[in-house]
């Protein structure tokens, strides 16, 4: 049970969904941020790649709800599906992703630890693999935003979804409709 009374059945609205319904005034801007970062058209990073960054950071933060949901969202939008997402989360160096995406995920991991751990060497390594300034910027912002989202979910002590199929159902909704509608 959440640390505060959200005024709803948390089993029906797990994770971030409960707090978003509790505080619709903040849900709108948070959903707009997620939409811009993860779902809106991007010139070079696919929605699946951006969701993978969110899932990776959420896994590093041990946020069960966000890691599970964004892993499902990434899997629904990446050719490698959930096996690829699990591979990245378990062994980034051995994962079957492009060298550019691997370098961007390393930047995301540095942000997760402390934004100051993003070094010129990490950025140069990403650039050497073809990453643009926009991709580096968006990776840092996705990672930073997901540290906030993870702390929001876990700081309120919300419940993860009881049924893993709930994440897959949400993934299909997000894939089609994005984050513009209420959870």
Image (cartoon, helix red, strand yellow):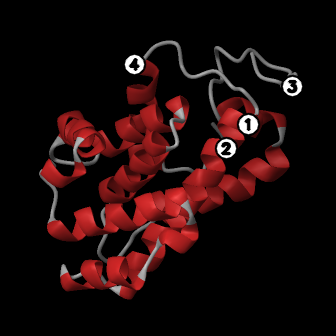
Q: Earlier in the sequence, mark 3 or mark 4?
A: 3
Whether the residues at callouts 3 and 1 have beta carbons within 8 Å, the answer is no
**Quadrant where the image shows the C terminus:** top right
Mark 1, Cα crowd under 10 Å, few <14 / some 14-19 / many 20+, is few
The residue sitting at 34% across, 76% down in the picture is 122
Which of 39/19 is in front? Answer: 19
Q: Label 1 belongs to which residue?
A: 155
Q: From the viewer's perspective, is 112 left or right of 169? A: right
Q: Residue at x 25, y 65 (%)?
A: 101
Coordinates of residue 134 in the picture (x, y in percent): 41, 82
Q: Quadrant of the N terminus?
A: top right
Query: Which element carries disc 2, helix, strand or loop?
Result: helix
What residue is at 39 percent from the left and 86 percent from the top? Answer: 133
Name the residue that disc number 2 marks: 151
Q: Residues within 10 Å of mark 3 (few under 14, many from 20)?
A: few
Q: Are marks 1 and 2 in contact (CB under 8 Å)?
A: yes
Which residue lies at the image location 86% right of the left edge and 25% below the top edge? Answer: 4
Labelled disc at residue 111: none
Specify the label residue 165 is tagged with: 4
* Residue pointed to by mark 3: 4
Q: CA distance from mark 3 to mark 1?
A: 10 Å
Say which of 85 and 72 sits in front: 85
């Amino acid at each position: 049970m959440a640390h505060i009374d959200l005024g709803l059945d948390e089993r029906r609205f797990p994770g971030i969904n409960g707090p978003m319904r509790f505080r619709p005034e903040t849900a709108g801007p948070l959903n707009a941020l997620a939409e811009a970062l993860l779902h809106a058209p991007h010139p070079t990073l696919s929605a699946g790649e951006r969701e993978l960054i969110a899932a990776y950071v959420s896994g590093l933060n041990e946020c069960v709800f966000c890691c599970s949901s964004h892993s499902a969202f990434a899997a629904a939008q990446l050719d490698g599906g959930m096996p690829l997402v699990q591979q990245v989360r378990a062994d980034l160096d051995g994962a079957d992703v492009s060298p550019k995406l691997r370098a961007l995920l390393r930047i995301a991991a540095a942000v997760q630890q402390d934004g100051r751990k993003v070094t010129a060497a990490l950025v140069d390594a990403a650039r050497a693999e073809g990453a643009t300034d926009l991709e580096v910027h968006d990776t840092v912002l996705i990672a930073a935003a997901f540290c906030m989202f993870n702390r929001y979910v876990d700081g309120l002590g919300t419940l993860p979804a009881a049924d893993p199929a709930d994440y897959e159902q949400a993934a299909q909704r997000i894939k089609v409709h994005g984050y513009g509608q209420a959870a």
